[in-house]
Image (tube, helix red, strand yellow):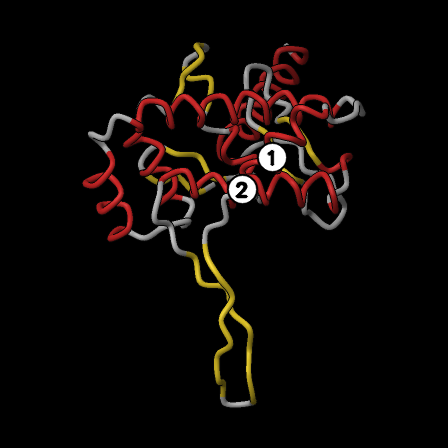
């Protein structure tokens, strides 16, 4: 389980890690994205941008009049993705409005391909270029598009913790992952099972 600046990065999928910015803490819902700066810090935590880009975006955009509107778009996109993922886990279709939103974000773009000389020949590499905060949503939308296009819906899982709301994509060999993290919900479940076995022996 990797945690950076209180962000939980455990999903093996960027769009699911985006959903996981909403958690349950001490039995109460908690939103880890409360403002524009939080979203930029999350983008750095998941390595979409580096510290220099993060500081630049906050410095250049934090006080812009458009920032509040953009942050509302971030929250709306997350709400739409959560609805989509909940539908996927229940073997339901994806709404046309969701596809339209994802495509709209994909059209924004955020970089370019570049041909680079290597020791063995040439290689095409993608160079990300986040000039505007809106472009940070594009790789999240790409991740969601890949998930529904190429992923196995059966491997999109919600943690089995009784109060946990975190999602992950199960990449384990036997697809037997049950918990967001063995150090969190997994350990709690083990402890509860041990307590129950011990209680029955008394």
Q: Nearer the viewer, residue 78 or 168?
A: 78
The percent position of residue 17, horizontal first and vertical second, equals 51, 36
Please, is residue 40 above or below residue 84 in the view?
Answer: below
Please, is residue 140 above or below residue 53 in the view?
Answer: above
Residue 59 falls left or right of residue 189: left
Q: Nearer the viewer, residue 97 or 84?
A: 97
| Residue depicted at x 42% and y 49% | 48
| Residue depicted at x 45% and y 25% | 73
Residue that carries the numbered disc 2 in the rendered image: 14
Residue 87 falls left or right of residue 158: right
* Label located before the other in sequence (2 or 1): 2
Q: Nearer the viewer, residue 115 or 11?
A: 115
Q: Residues within 10 Å of mark 1 (few under 14, many from 20)?
A: many
Residue that carries the numbered disc 1 in the rendered image: 102
Give the quadrant of residue 128. bottom left
Disc count in the image? 2
The percent position of residue 133, horizontal first and vertical second, equals 36, 39
Residue 38 falls left or right of residue 199: left
| Residue depicted at x 60% and y 35% | 102
Dot 1: what SS? helix
| Mark 2 and mark 1: Cα distance apart in space | 14 Å
Q: Nearer the viewer, residue 143 or 180?
A: 143
Dot 2: what SS? helix
Badge 2 vs badge 1, beta-carbon distance below 8 Å: no
Please, is residue 120 above or below residue 47 in the view?
Answer: below
């Amino acid at each position: 389980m990797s945690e950076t600046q209180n962000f939980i990065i455990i999903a093996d999928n960027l769009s699911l890690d985006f959903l996981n910015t909403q958690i349950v803490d001490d039995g109460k819902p908690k939103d880890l994205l409360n403002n524009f700066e939080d979203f930029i810090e999350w983008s750095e935590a998941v390595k979409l941008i580096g510290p220099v880009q993060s500081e630049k975006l906050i410095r250049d955009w934090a006080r812009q009049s458009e920032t509040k509107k953009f942050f509302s778009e971030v929250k709306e996109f997350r709400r739409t993705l959560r609805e989509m993922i909940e539908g996927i886990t229940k073997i339901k279709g994806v709404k046309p409005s969701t596809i339209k939103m994802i495509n709209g974000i994909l059209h924004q773009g955020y970089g370019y391909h570049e041909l680079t000389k290597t020791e063995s020949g040439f290689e095409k590499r993608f160079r990300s270029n986040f000039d505007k905060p809106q472009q940070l949503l594009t790789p999240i939308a790409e991740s969601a598009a890949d998930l529904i296009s190429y992923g196995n819906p059966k491997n999109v899982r919600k943690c089995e913790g009784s109060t946990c709301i975190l999602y992950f994509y199960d990449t384990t060999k036997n697809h037997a992952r049950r918990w967001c993290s063995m150090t969190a919900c997994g350990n709690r479940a083990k402890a509860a099972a041990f307590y129950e076995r011990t209680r029955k022996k008394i």
